[in-house]
Image (cartoon, rainbow, N blue to C red):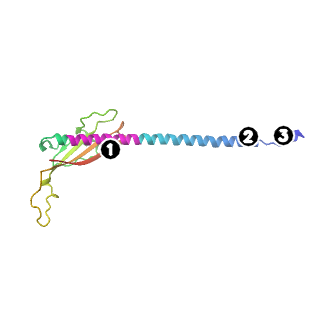
Amino acid sequence: MNFNLHRNQTGFTLIMSLLILVVLTILGLTSTQSTRTEVAMAGNLRESDMAFQVAEMGLSSGEEFIQTNVSNTSFNDSNGLISKTGYDPDYFDTTSWSSVQTSTATIANVYTQPKYIIKYLGDRSQNEVALVNIGGYGTAQPGITVSNYRVTAKGSGQTDSAARMIQSYYGKD
Protein backbone atom coordinates (compact mmCIF):
# COMPACT_ATOMS: atom_id res chain seq x y z
CA MET A 1 0.00 0.00 0.00
CA ASN A 2 2.87 2.32 0.60
CA PHE A 3 4.01 1.90 -3.00
CA ASN A 4 0.69 3.21 -4.38
CA LEU A 5 0.92 6.53 -2.50
CA HIS A 6 4.35 7.35 -3.91
CA ARG A 7 3.31 6.53 -7.52
CA ASN A 8 0.38 8.99 -7.38
CA GLN A 9 2.62 11.99 -6.54
CA THR A 10 3.20 14.16 -9.62
CA GLY A 11 5.82 16.72 -8.36
CA PHE A 12 3.43 19.42 -7.17
CA THR A 13 5.90 20.60 -4.48
CA LEU A 14 8.68 21.04 -7.03
CA ILE A 15 6.45 23.09 -9.34
CA MET A 16 5.29 25.34 -6.46
CA SER A 17 8.88 25.84 -5.29
CA LEU A 18 9.95 26.88 -8.78
CA LEU A 19 7.01 29.31 -9.10
CA ILE A 20 7.86 30.91 -5.75
CA LEU A 21 11.53 31.17 -6.81
CA VAL A 22 10.53 32.92 -10.07
CA VAL A 23 8.30 35.39 -8.19
CA LEU A 24 11.10 36.19 -5.69
CA THR A 25 13.58 36.69 -8.52
CA ILE A 26 11.24 39.14 -10.26
CA LEU A 27 10.74 41.06 -6.99
CA GLY A 28 14.52 41.22 -6.46
CA LEU A 29 15.19 42.52 -9.96
CA THR A 30 12.43 45.12 -9.64
CA SER A 31 13.76 46.43 -6.33
CA THR A 32 17.29 46.61 -7.76
CA GLN A 33 16.05 48.67 -10.72
CA SER A 34 14.04 50.91 -8.39
CA THR A 35 17.08 51.49 -6.17
CA ARG A 36 19.23 52.31 -9.20
CA THR A 37 16.64 54.88 -10.37
CA GLU A 38 16.43 56.49 -6.92
CA VAL A 39 20.21 56.80 -6.71
CA ALA A 40 20.26 58.52 -10.13
CA MET A 41 17.48 60.88 -9.04
CA ALA A 42 19.35 61.79 -5.85
CA GLY A 43 22.51 62.47 -7.86
CA ASN A 44 20.62 64.71 -10.30
CA LEU A 45 19.04 66.64 -7.43
CA ARG A 46 22.44 67.12 -5.80
CA GLU A 47 23.91 68.33 -9.11
CA SER A 48 21.02 70.74 -9.65
CA ASP A 49 21.25 72.17 -6.12
CA MET A 50 25.00 72.59 -6.42
CA ALA A 51 24.61 74.43 -9.74
CA PHE A 52 22.02 76.76 -8.18
CA GLN A 53 24.28 77.54 -5.21
CA VAL A 54 27.22 78.23 -7.53
CA ALA A 55 24.99 80.59 -9.59
CA GLU A 56 24.02 82.40 -6.37
CA MET A 57 27.72 82.83 -5.62
CA GLY A 58 28.14 84.39 -9.09
CA LEU A 59 25.18 86.69 -8.43
CA SER A 60 26.74 87.80 -5.17
CA SER A 61 30.05 88.48 -6.94
CA GLY A 62 28.26 90.55 -9.58
CA GLU A 63 26.50 92.64 -6.95
CA GLU A 64 29.83 93.10 -5.14
CA PHE A 65 31.39 94.28 -8.42
CA ILE A 66 28.64 96.88 -8.80
CA GLN A 67 29.08 98.07 -5.23
CA THR A 68 32.86 98.53 -5.58
CA ASN A 69 32.70 99.98 -9.13
CA VAL A 70 33.32 103.71 -9.01
CA SER A 71 31.95 104.73 -12.41
CA ASN A 72 29.40 103.51 -14.93
CA THR A 73 31.90 104.10 -17.77
CA SER A 74 33.22 100.55 -17.37
CA PHE A 75 29.93 99.31 -18.86
CA ASN A 76 31.17 99.44 -22.45
CA ASP A 77 29.60 96.31 -24.00
CA SER A 78 32.64 94.10 -23.42
CA ASN A 79 33.62 91.45 -20.88
CA GLY A 80 30.01 90.96 -19.82
CA LEU A 81 29.50 94.61 -18.82
CA ILE A 82 26.67 95.92 -21.01
CA SER A 83 25.86 99.60 -21.39
CA LYS A 84 22.38 101.08 -21.17
CA THR A 85 22.05 101.16 -24.96
CA GLY A 86 23.78 97.80 -25.52
CA TYR A 87 21.89 94.66 -26.49
CA ASP A 88 21.47 91.74 -24.14
CA PRO A 89 23.25 88.58 -25.25
CA ASP A 90 21.46 85.28 -25.74
CA TYR A 91 21.87 83.94 -22.22
CA PHE A 92 21.14 80.38 -23.36
CA ASP A 93 23.94 80.42 -25.93
CA THR A 94 27.15 79.03 -24.42
CA THR A 95 29.33 81.36 -26.52
CA SER A 96 27.76 84.34 -24.72
CA TRP A 97 29.44 83.16 -21.54
CA SER A 98 32.94 82.65 -22.96
CA SER A 99 34.39 86.11 -22.25
CA VAL A 100 32.43 87.46 -19.29
CA GLN A 101 33.18 88.27 -15.69
CA THR A 102 34.11 85.36 -13.42
CA SER A 103 33.49 85.24 -9.69
CA THR A 104 36.33 86.40 -7.48
CA ALA A 105 35.84 83.47 -5.11
CA THR A 106 37.12 80.08 -6.23
CA ILE A 107 34.79 77.15 -5.62
CA ALA A 108 36.23 73.64 -5.51
CA ASN A 109 34.77 70.63 -7.34
CA VAL A 110 32.73 72.53 -9.92
CA TYR A 111 32.90 72.17 -13.70
CA THR A 112 33.27 75.93 -14.28
CA GLN A 113 33.57 78.82 -11.86
CA PRO A 114 30.48 81.06 -11.58
CA LYS A 115 30.18 83.79 -14.21
CA TYR A 116 28.04 86.88 -14.43
CA ILE A 117 26.85 89.46 -16.95
CA ILE A 118 25.79 92.92 -15.76
CA LYS A 119 23.59 95.30 -17.74
CA TYR A 120 23.51 98.94 -16.71
CA LEU A 121 19.84 100.00 -16.90
CA GLY A 122 20.37 103.71 -16.27
CA ASP A 123 19.73 106.00 -13.36
CA ARG A 124 16.35 106.34 -11.74
CA SER A 125 16.01 109.84 -13.21
CA GLN A 126 16.56 108.34 -16.70
CA ASN A 127 14.05 105.54 -16.19
CA GLU A 128 10.90 106.12 -18.23
CA VAL A 129 8.72 104.40 -15.63
CA ALA A 130 10.10 106.53 -12.78
CA LEU A 131 9.44 109.71 -14.79
CA VAL A 132 5.70 109.08 -15.05
CA ASN A 133 3.99 112.07 -13.50
CA ILE A 134 0.29 111.68 -12.81
CA GLY A 135 -1.59 114.95 -12.42
CA GLY A 136 1.54 117.08 -12.04
CA TYR A 137 2.31 115.64 -8.63
CA GLY A 138 6.02 115.70 -7.76
CA THR A 139 7.73 117.43 -10.67
CA ALA A 140 11.23 116.58 -9.41
CA GLN A 141 12.83 113.26 -8.53
CA PRO A 142 12.98 112.96 -4.76
CA GLY A 143 16.04 111.77 -2.86
CA ILE A 144 19.32 110.52 -4.22
CA THR A 145 20.14 109.26 -7.71
CA VAL A 146 20.04 105.48 -7.91
CA SER A 147 21.77 103.59 -10.70
CA ASN A 148 19.92 100.41 -11.71
CA TYR A 149 21.54 97.18 -12.89
CA ARG A 150 20.46 93.69 -13.86
CA VAL A 151 22.87 90.90 -12.91
CA THR A 152 22.59 87.51 -14.63
CA ALA A 153 24.72 84.71 -13.18
CA LYS A 154 25.42 81.19 -14.40
CA GLY A 155 26.70 78.29 -12.34
CA SER A 156 27.32 74.61 -12.89
CA GLY A 157 27.80 71.61 -10.65
CA GLN A 158 30.45 68.95 -10.97
CA THR A 159 29.39 68.45 -14.60
CA ASP A 160 28.05 70.92 -17.12
CA SER A 161 24.80 69.00 -17.50
CA ALA A 162 22.94 70.94 -14.81
CA ALA A 163 23.83 74.59 -15.43
CA ARG A 164 21.59 77.16 -13.71
CA MET A 165 21.04 80.85 -14.43
CA ILE A 166 19.52 83.39 -12.08
CA GLN A 167 18.95 87.15 -12.29
CA SER A 168 18.60 89.97 -9.84
CA TYR A 169 18.06 93.70 -10.08
CA TYR A 170 20.42 95.86 -8.07
CA GLY A 171 20.32 99.55 -7.26
CA LYS A 172 23.34 101.61 -6.19
CA ASP A 173 23.26 105.20 -4.98
- The residue range painted magenta reads 45-64
* Element under disc 2: helix
Q: Position of residue 138 (x, y in %)?
A: 11, 61
> Which residue position is annotated with label 3?
6
Would you say the residues marked 3 and 1 are in contact, meaning their CB atoms lie under 8 Å apart?
A: no
**Can you name the residue that lies furthest to the right here?**
1
Q: Position of residue 52 (x, y in %)?
A: 33, 43
Magenta includes 73?
Answer: no
Q: Nearer the viewer, residue 1 or 138?
A: 138
Q: Quadrant of the N terminus?
A: top right
Q: Position of residue 132 (x, y in %)?
A: 15, 61
Instruction: Please give the label number shown on residue 24.
Output: none
Q: Position of residue 105 (x, y in %)?
A: 26, 34
Principal secondary structure, stretch drawn in magenta: helix
Measuring 66% from the left and 40% from the top, which residue is drawn there? 21
In whole angstroms, how far apart are the C-alphas of marks 3 and 1? 73 Å
Q: Within 10 Å of the Cα at label 2, are there few (<14), some (14-19), or many (20+) other Cα atoms? A: few
Please tell me whether residue 170 is drawn above or below residue 101 in the rendered image: below
* Element under disc 3: helix
> Which residue position is annotated with label 2?
14
Disc 3 or 1, which lies upstream in sequence? Answer: 3
Q: Which kind of residue does numbered mark 1 sit on?
A: Arg
Q: Which kind of residue does numbered mark 2 sit on?
A: Leu
Q: Within 10 Å of the Cα at label 3, are there few (<14), some (14-19), or many (20+) other Cα atoms? A: few
Instruction: Please give the label number shown on residue 164.
Output: 1
Disc 3 or 2, which lies upstream in sequence? Answer: 3
Magenta includes 52?
Answer: yes
In whole angstroms, how far apart are the C-alphas of marks 2 and 1? 58 Å
